[in-house]
Image (cartoon, rainbow, N blue to C red):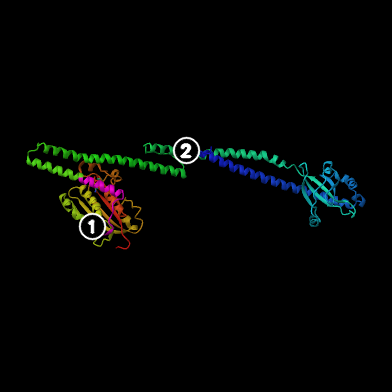
């Protein structure tokens, strides 16, 4: 029964309302009782004092005879509320104006201390008669009683109001208020539970669908509370899972495609050689060259793939030794000089000899930097320029160094950073490609059409820089060129 949130909410409201009603009822009844007592006593005391004054005018013989005493007081009784009893020193009733009361034999007496304490006032106490009726008893000591006399007290017995009366008066309005509160809480719990239950049910459904293989979901929740944030987080997760799933699929397609092309050509040429179809030694040499190049391409692809997979899985054990970055920049650039001069591109290095050392893996840093240089040379036209620069910049000065429009990575919020930039005057990268070039196998349309490559170079480079606590950012304009900037943290103790 308490399985649903809606019922639980309503039950808790119900409980709170009931507790409130009972509290209000109890407090009300207590208050009424108090009020009744004060009213009865105020009245009763005045009556008792008046009776006491009347007694002083009576002859002693009248006072000592209970029946006679009541007889004398009879005409006063008309003005009194309640009845009169005459009791002896032990509380035994000797006479009474009310038949019913007189048939009781005994009433409790206040302690004599109560009489001492309230000389001016009148001692009183509450008493419940055998029939369940409640009385306030006010005691007047018979001053003139002779030692031999039996009579001791004149008692004014005022009936208390019906104990259940306050209840009966309070109950209907209390119930009405309770009913109203219940109706409101029913509405509120319905509204609240709807805003909670709806999205939760939607999410449960979506999770079931995810388990069945449908990963993309967009649960619409307007609220900004915890449920809203949960739904937003869920949506993000579902998009991420869907994206990962898509990437996985694309990856398979890409790998098979990139392997198939060289394999087909290798098979074609080798088949021709095996079947002796190529006689001309010149053509034979060309065919062998192609087979060699295609096989090398496959080896490169498989090596890159493996590298990337290991980097992403965090399985690569990066060396952690001081690396002289000035030397590393020069060495990397030198490796690409033949490629640069073949393409008639001017390759320059502008970095001070005093660049700080970085703790890391020299070989992998060189590989990553090489990928950037390779791209710069690949996507720059004849006669262009490629520049490799390095400098140390404080975090708060990065904005002035990085190209405009580049977001400063969140990691570079303080400290000092080595900024290495590879700038080219090449074809540039269209804005729609910029966001994706670091993805595995992503290649620009132009690159796909006429440049060698598989689209893994930048992914690998980024993994390596990130593994060094760094980041890579890019700024590019179509037709003008690109600038890839790497940020690497400068260790505090090395300058
Ligand atoms: P690949 O160069 O093998 O295609 P990369 O991961 O190195 O793969 O680069 C991804 C894509 O980014 C390239 O296909 C190209 O479109 C673009 N790109 C990378 N570097 C440059 C550059 N310097 N100039 C223009 N485009 C670039």
Rendered residue at 22%/41% (across/down): 259
Dot 1 or dot 2: first in sequence order is: 2
Q: Kindly tell me whether residue 160 is visible in this rendering.
A: yes
Q: Which residue is mark 1?
A: 328
Few, some or many C-alpha atoms within 10 Å of disc 1 (few <14, some 14-19, many ≥20)? some
**274, 330: nearer the viewer:** 274
* Mark 1 and mark 2: Cα distance apart in space: 59 Å
Position of 84 compared to 233: left or right?
right
Q: Quadrant of the C terminus?
A: bottom left
Residue 177 to residue 56: above or below? above
Image coordinates of residue 294 in percent, x first then y, are 17, 43
In-image side of 2 versus 273 (left or right): right
Q: Is residue 354 magenta?
A: no
Q: For mark 1, give the secondary structure.
A: helix
Closest to the observer, 164 or 387: 164
Per the rendered image, the range of residues in magenta is 299-322
Marks 1/2 in contact by CB < 8 Å: the verdict is no
Q: Which mark is residue 198?
A: 2
Residue 323 percent location from the top left of the image: 26, 59
């Amino acid at each position: 029964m308490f399985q649903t949130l809606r019922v639980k909410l309503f039950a808790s409201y119900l409980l709170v309302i009931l507790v409130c009603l009972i509290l209000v009822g109890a407090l009300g009844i207590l208050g009424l009782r108090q009020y009744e007592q004060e009213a009865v006593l105020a009245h009763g005391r005045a009556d008792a004092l008046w009776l006491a004054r009347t007694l002083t005018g009576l002859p002693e013989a009248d006072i000592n005879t209970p029946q006679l005493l009541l007889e004398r007081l009879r005409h006063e009784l008309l003005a009194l509320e309640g009845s009169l009893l005459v009791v002896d020193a032990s509380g035994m009733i000797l006479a009474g104006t009310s038949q019913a009361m007189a048939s009781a034999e005994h009433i409790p007496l206040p302690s004599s201390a109560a009489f001492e304490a309230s000389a001016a006032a009148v001692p009183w106490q509450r008493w419940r008669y055998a029939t369940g009726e409640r009385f306030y008893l006010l005691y007047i000591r018979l001053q003139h009683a002779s030692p031999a006399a039996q009579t001791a007290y004149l008692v004014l017995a005022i009936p208390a109001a019906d104990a259940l009366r306050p209840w009966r008066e309070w109950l209907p309005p209390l119930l009405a208020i309770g009913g109203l509160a219940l109706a409101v809480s029913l509405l509120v719990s319905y509204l609240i539970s709807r805003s909670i239950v709806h999205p939760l049910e939607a999410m449960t459904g979506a999770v079931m669908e995810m388990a069945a293989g449908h990963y993309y979901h967009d649960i619409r929740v307007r609220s900004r509370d915890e449920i809203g944030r949960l739904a937003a987080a869920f949506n993000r997760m579902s998009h991420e899972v869907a994206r990962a799933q898509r990437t996985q699929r694309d990856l398979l397609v890409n790998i098979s495609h990139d392997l198939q092309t060289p394999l087909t050509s290798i098979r074609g040429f080798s088949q021709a050689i095996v079947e002796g179809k190529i006689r001309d030694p010149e053509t034979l040499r060309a065919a062998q060259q192609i087979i060699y190049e295609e096989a090398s391409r496959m080896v490169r692809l498989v090596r890159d793939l493996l590298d990337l997979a290991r980097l992403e899985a965090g399985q690569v054990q990066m060396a952690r030794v001081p690396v002289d970055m000035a030397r590393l920049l020069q060495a990397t650039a030198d490796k690409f000089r033949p490629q640069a001069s073949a393409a008639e591109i001017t390759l320059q290095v502008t970095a001070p000899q005093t660049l700080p050392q970085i703790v890391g893996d020299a070989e992998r840093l060189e590989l990553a930097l090489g990928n950037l240089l390779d791209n710069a040379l690949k996507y720059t036209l004849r006669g262009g320029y490629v520049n490799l620069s390095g400098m140390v910049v404080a975090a708060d000065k990065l904005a002035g160094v990085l190209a405009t429009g580049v977001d400063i990575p969140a990691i570079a919020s303080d400290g000092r950073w080595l900024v290495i930039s590879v700038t080219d005057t090449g074809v540039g990268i269209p804005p729609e490609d910029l966001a994706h070039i670091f993805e595995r196998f992503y290649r620009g349309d132009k690159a796909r059409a006429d440049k060698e490559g598989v689209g893994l170079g930048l992914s690998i480079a980024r993994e390596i820089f990130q593994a060094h606590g760094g980041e890579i950012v890019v700024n590019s304009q179509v037709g003008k060129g690109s600038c890839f900037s790497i940020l690497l943290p400068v260790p505090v103790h090395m300058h």
